[in-house]
Amino acid sequence: MPIPTAINLHKASRTLSLTYGPGETYDLSAEFLRVHSPSAEVQGHGKPVLQFGKQQVTLDKIEPAGQYALKLVFGDGHDSGLFTWDYLWELATERDKLWQSYLEALAAAGKSRDPDVSAVRLML
């Protein structure tokens, strides 16, 4: 289980930087982390719930959860779900693939990343 050697919250850019070794730093946006939260609210109980409108969400605080995870506190009030070291590693190393899948799911559902956009499908 890879454990980051450094964890930095950059509030201005709304990113969490995870460093695992020399030249091995991953920047994860607050939006990416929020829509991939391991919480039951997001993951459902075996059936993930598509998150949308989270483009402007902030990551306000990170807290250690024992020796195995981080608790992330988001600006929209979401703070459940523990991001284990294994899950953070997966998010970091699979970021591009996961992000593309998320964007495709949004498009298929007619949803938007923008909280101020509400899509309506008309059936003619």
Image (tube, helix red, strand yellow):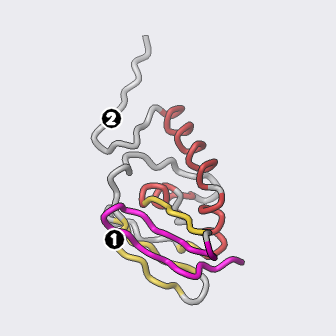
How many marks the image carries: the answer is 2
Q: What is the span of residues highlighted in magenta in the rendered image?
A: 1-22
Q: Could you tell me which quadrant the N terminus lies in? A: bottom right
Q: Residues within 10 Å of mark 1 (few under 14, many from 20)?
A: some
Say whether residue 10 is magenta: yes
Q: Nearer the viewer, residue 108 or 98?
A: 98
Q: Could you tell me which quadrant the C terminus lies in? A: top left
Residue depicted at x 50% and y 33%: 107
View extreme (bottom): residue: 66
Compared to 43, does 61 lie above or below?
A: below
Query: Which label sits on residue 60?
Result: 1
View extreme (right): residue: 1
Compared to 51, does 103 lie above or below?
A: above
Marked residue nearer the N-terminal end (2 or 1): 1
Q: Nearer the viewer, mark 2 or mark 1?
A: 1
Q: Nearer the viewer, residue 88 or 26?
A: 26
Q: Residues within 10 Å of mark 2 (few under 14, many from 20)?
A: few
Q: Which residue is denoted by mark 2 in the rendering?
A: 118
The amino acid marked with disc number 2 is Ser
Residue 71: x %, y % from top left: 47, 77
Q: Is residue 13 left or right of residue 33?
A: left
Residue depicted at x 61% and y 69%: 23
Residue 83: x %, y % from top left: 55, 72
